[in-house]
């Protein structure tokens, strides 16, 4: 299958390992991954902060860039959620019915990594090997907007060598929420404290998730606490093998 990689801003600028692992994993599974060079920010930050007019050119560009592809994947439930649930809304709000229809089409073929693997490719065992004690944090957008359910956990349970432990209060938000963490710093910090405490309860070496943004937030809290727990994107675990 030919799959287009929607890399996302955060992976492109700060956490490229997640994007590289996504490519490595899919190529190992026998698929061709292409990178449309015209892609930029999907506009999620603008929409979530109330700047829909400023998001419109980004939606137009995203639709134009990815429309030629039949399957699109991103290592981010948050950005996929924006493409699938916000782009057509922004276009309709601007009175552009044609763009809304095209955005709806692009959104319908855009998948978060675990969705692509389980729902599209029909795979739950990707042949990964990761001999570490790991706990999984289901990010809000993947859990509530995309409704990926237990797909990431089903993939993790098939990783050889892994010691996968349940995270207490797993469905509770970590407190990031993009600009929420800046505008509501005290509330965000309190939520983060709860989340990092739960991670520490598990005795895990690694906390994983499908969004680098949430891992950045959780990882910062763990680092400041001197916890010694690493944050690793789901794609990096699934891409790991005995030879890597």
Image (tube, rainbow, N blue to C red):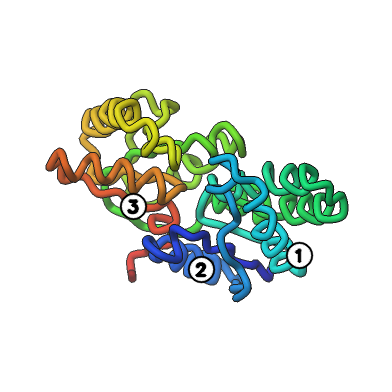
Residue count near mark 3 (Cα–Cα under 10 Å), binned few <14, some 14–19, many ≥20: many
Point out the frontmost of discs 2 and 1. Answer: 1
The residue identified by callout 3 is 232
Q: Is residue 184 left or right of residue 140?
A: left
Answer with left or right where residue 30 lies relative to residue 167: right
Q: Quadrant of the N terminus?
A: bottom right
Tell me if label 2 and label 1 are in contact, CB under 8 Å.
no
Task: Residue at 37%, 64% (x, y): give it.
Answer: 241
Q: Position of residue 26 (x, y in %)?
A: 55, 66
Residue drawn at (67%, 49%) of the image: 53
Image point (39%, 43%), residue name: 214
Q: Is mark 1 on a helix, strand or loop?
A: loop
Q: Is mark 2 on a helix, strand or loop?
A: helix
Residue to which mark 2 is pinned: 23
Which element type, helix, strand or loop, lies under badge 3?
strand
Mark 3 to mark 2 CA distance (whole Å): 16 Å
Q: Earlier in the sequence, mark 3 or mark 2?
A: 2
Distance, label 1 to label 3, CA atoms, is 31 Å
- Residue 185's place in the image compared with 103, above or below, is above
Is the residue marked by circle 1 packed among few (<14), some (14-19), or many (20+) residues within 10 Å? Answer: some
**Residue tagged by mark 1?**
67
């Amino acid at each position: 299958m030919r799959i287009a990689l929607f890399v996302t801003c955060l992976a492109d600028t700060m956490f490229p390992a997640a994007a590289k692992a996504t490519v490595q994993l899919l190529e190992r599974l026998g698929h061709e991954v292409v990178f449309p060079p015209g892609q930029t920010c999907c506009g999620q930050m603008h929409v979530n902060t109330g700047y829909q007019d400023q998001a419109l050119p980004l939606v137009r560009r995203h639709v134009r860039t990815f429309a030629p592809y039949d399957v699109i994947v991103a290592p981010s439930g948050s950005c996929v959620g924006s493409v699938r649930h916000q782009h057509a809304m922004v276009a309709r709000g601007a009175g552009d019915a044609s763009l809304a229809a095209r955005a709806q089409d692009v959104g319908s073929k855009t998948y978060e990594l675990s969705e692509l693997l389980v729902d599209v490719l029909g795979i739950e065992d990707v042949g990964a090997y990761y001999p570490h004690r790991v706990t999984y944090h289901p990010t809000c957008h993947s859990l509530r907007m995309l409704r990926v359910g237990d797909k990431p956990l089903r993939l993790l349970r098939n990783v050889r060598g892994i010691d996968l432990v349940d995270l207490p209060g797993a469905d509770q938000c970590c407190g990031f929420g993009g600009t929420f963490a800046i505008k509501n710093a005290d509330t965000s910090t309190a939520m983060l404290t709860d989340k990092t405490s739960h991670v520490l309860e598990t005795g895990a070496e690694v906390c994983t998730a499908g969004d680098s943004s949430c891992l950045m937030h959780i990882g910062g809290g763990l680092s400041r606490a001197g916890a010694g727990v690493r944050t690793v994107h789901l794609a990096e675990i699934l891409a790991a093998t005995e030879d890597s």
